[in-house]
Image: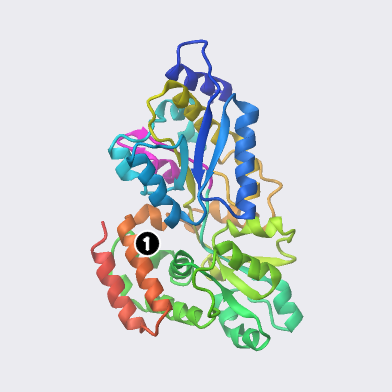
Amino acid sequence: MRSVKTALGLAASLALPAGIAQATDLEVTHWWTSGGEAAAVRVLADSLTANTEHTWVDGAIAGSAATANPIIISRILGGNPMGATQMNTGRDAEDLIRAGLMTDLTEVAEAEGWRDAIRPAHLLDACIHEGRVYCVPINIHSWQWMWINRHVFEDKGVPVPSNWQELAAAAPALWEAGIVPLATGQPWQVNGIRAVMEQGIGGPGLYLAINRDRDEEAIRSDANRAVWEAFAQARDMVDDAHSGRDWNIATNMVIQGTAAAQIMGDWAQGEFAVAGREAGVDYDCLPGLGHHMVLDTGGDAFYFPRIDDPETRQAQLALASLLVRPDVQVAFNLVKGSLPVRGDVDLAAANACMQKGLEILASEDGVLPSGEQLLDSDTQGQMQDLAIEFFSSDMSVDTAIDRQARIIARAR
């Protein structure tokens, strides 16, 4: 594999005449604003400063992907693009790529052997359009985790749960002790609970049959009914003030012991780390809700809007190269709580929860594509709307299944 120095030289040669290098302030937009996320962003910004002549100009957008994506897309379409932007690894940027509004990174990807280094392979595949590479996967994030405050259960004399059903069984005792059984918040978090249950309770076969194969028989199966029944349990385990709560605030409820558990992606681990909590001692992490040990392999990627300025393009290619460097991959993901996209890095320092994730990732049977990779944005939005309506009402499981079948039948 060619060295990073060689690749950076190639990036510069693609943009500027030989021997010319210009320092550039590169605006980077993202929605990483919690304590743990901000610490991870600093790793990237400091790495850019230390390894190139360019400067990371932070363009944080408070909120989630649902808040940030419309702002990011509007700026690009409106002719005011940023130098680089975080987006989820998936299909959110398809229309921008088709419109020719994203920078082609193929030369750097080929020079550095991204195809050989990045795994699972579908992470890079999600960046490819008509044979060309348009984004850089930077991490593997998975939604399929339940985070448990061990002390809440130990102090109350309640067995620490090892799966979803044990948590649900403990809910009455937790309520009696004045503890919220399940912390959650904004609509995307609630829909995340449903999606995780589809994978962790329903199992990988059900998840793929519904979201990849669009199989109506799977939607109407007993396995999917069990998923919606578990989701109905969850709506009785949250506090009345949950609506609109930020995810990291919900995580902090678990950290502080006012809530017992949270179903949230592995990015929650960054908050536990910032709070000084130790995996396996202060908190437990249950992949697949303790039932099916599966993880999807979504995550974050960086895209580089096309800007007709050679100096900016050179800075964009330099950052793209930096993001997949082994040392940057290790430093960033240890802080972020995610897993690296490279299979050739040393993560001996990973904690107990990250080690669980790495073990699952090493097993082909435990790895699933994310919902963003299987379903178009409109279908994802419709499923979220259904999840929220179900969660905030007494909608029956039968009604929810009928509506899910109609949504999936229309999916692109």
Using residue 288 as the reference point, say whether residue 254 is left or right of it: right
Q: Nearer the viewer, residue 385 or 76?
A: 76
Q: Would you say residue 345 is visible in this rendering?
A: no
| Residue 126 sits in quarter | top left
Using residue 173 as the reference point, say whether residue 15 is left or right of it: left
Q: Is residue 117 above or below residue 285?
A: above
Which residue was labeled with disc 1? 208
Three-letter residue code for mark 1:
Leu
**Residue at horizontal 32%, vertical 71%?**
218
**Residue at horizontal 37%, vertical 25%?**
308
Q: Would you say residue 314 is visible in this rendering?
A: yes
Q: Residues within 10 Å of mark 1 (few under 14, many from 20)?
A: some
* Image: magenta residue range: 120-139
**Residue at horizontal 71%, vertical 76%?**
152
Q: Nearer the viewer, residue 329 or 119?
A: 329
Q: Nearer the viewer, residue 373 or 85?
A: 85
| Residue 106 sits in quarter | top left
Quadrant in which the C terminus is drawn: bottom left
Quadrant in which the N terminus is drawn: top right
**Residue at horizontal 36%, vertical 46%?**
74
Q: Position of residue 381 (x, y in %)?
A: 35, 62
Q: Position of residue 397 (x, y in %)?
A: 36, 82
Q: Is residue 268 above or below residue 74?
A: below
Q: Position of residue 188 (x, y in %)?
A: 45, 64
> Was residue 206 drawn as part of the magenta stretch in this picture?
no
Q: Position of residue 281 (x, y in %)?
A: 75, 65
> Was residue 133 drawn as part of the magenta stretch in this picture?
yes
Numbered marks: total: 1
Label 1 secondary element = helix
| Residue 101 sits in quarter | top left
Q: Is residue 103 above or below residue 231?
A: above
